[in-house]
Image (cartoon, rainbow, N blue to C red):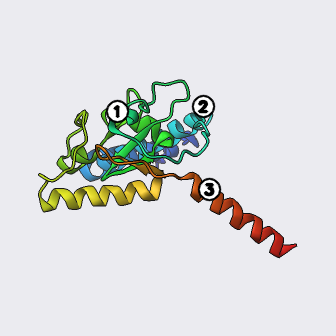
Amino acid sequence: MAENKEPPTTAAEPESSLLAGFVSEVIRSPVNLALVAIIALLVYKIFKSRTKQDEPVQRIKELPKMRRDFTVEELKEYNGTQADGRILVAVNGNVYDVTKGARFYGPGGPYAAFGGRDASRGLATFSVVPGKDDYDDLSDLNTDEMNSVKEWEEQFKERYDYVGKLLKPGEAPTNYSDEEEEGSQQESENKSKSD
């Protein structure tokens, strides 16, 4: 009787047949193909984000806090192009220092048209165009647009430092030095109480 002898198998053959079976299973199902594509994309993003971490982070300039009111004309000077790079934006009559958001509001940013200007009308109408060159009282905006301006103003209050008011024509600026002196006086009193 003749024996049926199978050729001897090597350790590489089961591994290659396992890999071939896996690949053929993935290729047969569109769902599996989509999952493999998503996993590959996620792995790519992980490696890409690790290489970005090695790049130096741009430092945001630490500027001294500013406290004053502005006319529309004075505000235009603070669009990020001056030596210190300070960027101010007015929203609903209040001026905010948005310098730490320079990548958005500074030169070349997507909202650069708002830098050094009253952004209220643009935010209300979802239009990124420079505001009026004179004071805009916003009286022609409808209720929904005004609500939008107020929502934006809340976001600015949370993210950026309040600087002062946007002055109406003929309006006198507030003297903020009184507030600073009061703050200094309170600090002195608190120190003397704790001593």
Which residue occupies 58% across, 57% down? 178
**Mark 2 highlights which residue?**
55
Q: Which mark is residue 171?
A: none
**Mark 3 highlights which residue?**
180
Residues at discs 1 and 2 in contact (Cβ within 8 Å): no
In the picture shown, does residue 55 fall above or below 119? above
Q: Which sits in the foreground, 161 or 57?
A: 161
Q: Residues within 10 Å of mark 3 (few under 14, many from 20)?
A: few
Q: Earlier in the sequence, mark 1 or mark 2?
A: 2
Q: Which sits in the foreground, 70 or 11?
A: 70
Q: Quadrant of residue 154?
A: bottom left
**Mark 1 highlights which residue?**
73
Q: Residues within 10 Å of mark 1 (few under 14, many from 20)?
A: few
The mark closer to the camera, 3 or 2, is: 3
* Residue 5 appears left or right of 141: right
Q: Which sits in the foreground, 77 or 180?
A: 180
What amino acid type is highlighted by mark number 1? Glu
